[in-house]
Amino acid sequence: MRVVTYIAAGIFALTASSAFAQMSGPGTATPRTGPSTAAPAAAPKAPAANPLKDEDVSALSGADVYGADGKKIGSISTALMKPDTKTIDRLVVSSGGVLGVGAHRVALPIDQFKWDGEKDGFVIAKSADDLKSMAEWQDPARASTSGVGSSTPPAR
C-alpha cells in the first residue's frame, strides 16, 4: 500500500511541476499565441583543442581517427614515446572490432596525424583497408613469452 502512495505522490509532483512551469505569474496562465516560442539557435560549436598541444596527453586515448575520405576509421588506443627524449613519436590506432575486442592495432608516426578541431579528431592519409593491411602492433606488456607458463603438461 505504501508503494502505491509513493508512486501517486511522485506522479502528482511531476505533473504539478510542469503545470507551474507553464504559468507566467501567480495564478495566471498564458496561452501560447503569437510568434513561435522556439529556443534561439545554439551557438556554433567551438573547435576542439589539439590534445597533442596539452601537457596532459591523457585525452589522446579514445580520440577519433578519420581517413582521407573523411570517414571514421578508428581511435587512438595508445601513445608511444621515445624513452631517451620522453617525447611522443607514435600513436597506436585501433581499427575495427567491437568495444576494443578484435580490433587491429597499428602504430603510426606522429607526423602522419593532423588535428581537425571541427571533427574533434585526427585525420590521416590512409583508409581502413590500408590499416588492415599493415603489421599489427603488439603491446610488449601483454605479449606472452613462448613456452613459459604453458598449461600443457610435458609429454612422457
Image (cartoon, rainbow, N blue to C red):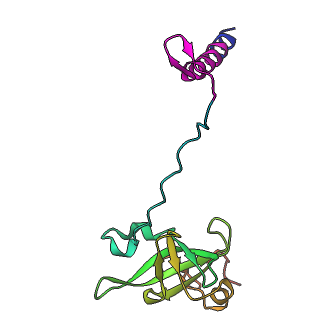
Residue visible at 43% across and 89% down in the picture: 111
- Image location (x, y in percent) of residue 152: 67, 77
Pick the front one: 148 or 89? 89
Pick the front one: 69 or 103? 69
Residue visible at 66% across and 17% down in the picture: 7
Q: What stretch is highlighted in magenta?
A: 8-33
- The answer to whether 73 is drawn above or below residue 83 in the figure is above
- Image location (x, y in percent) of residue 13: 59, 17
- The answer to whether 94 is drawn above or below residue 29 in the figure is below
Q: On the picture, is 63 further left or further right than 12?
A: left
- Image location (x, y in percent) of residue 136: 60, 86
Residue 30 lies in magenta, yes or no?
yes
Quadrant of the frame with the C terminus? bottom right
Residue visible at 60% across and 85% down in the picture: 68
Asked which quadrant contains residue 80, the reply is bottom left
- Image location (x, y in percent) of residue 62: 51, 68
Residue 118 lies in magenta, yes or no?
no
Residue extending farthest to the top is: 1
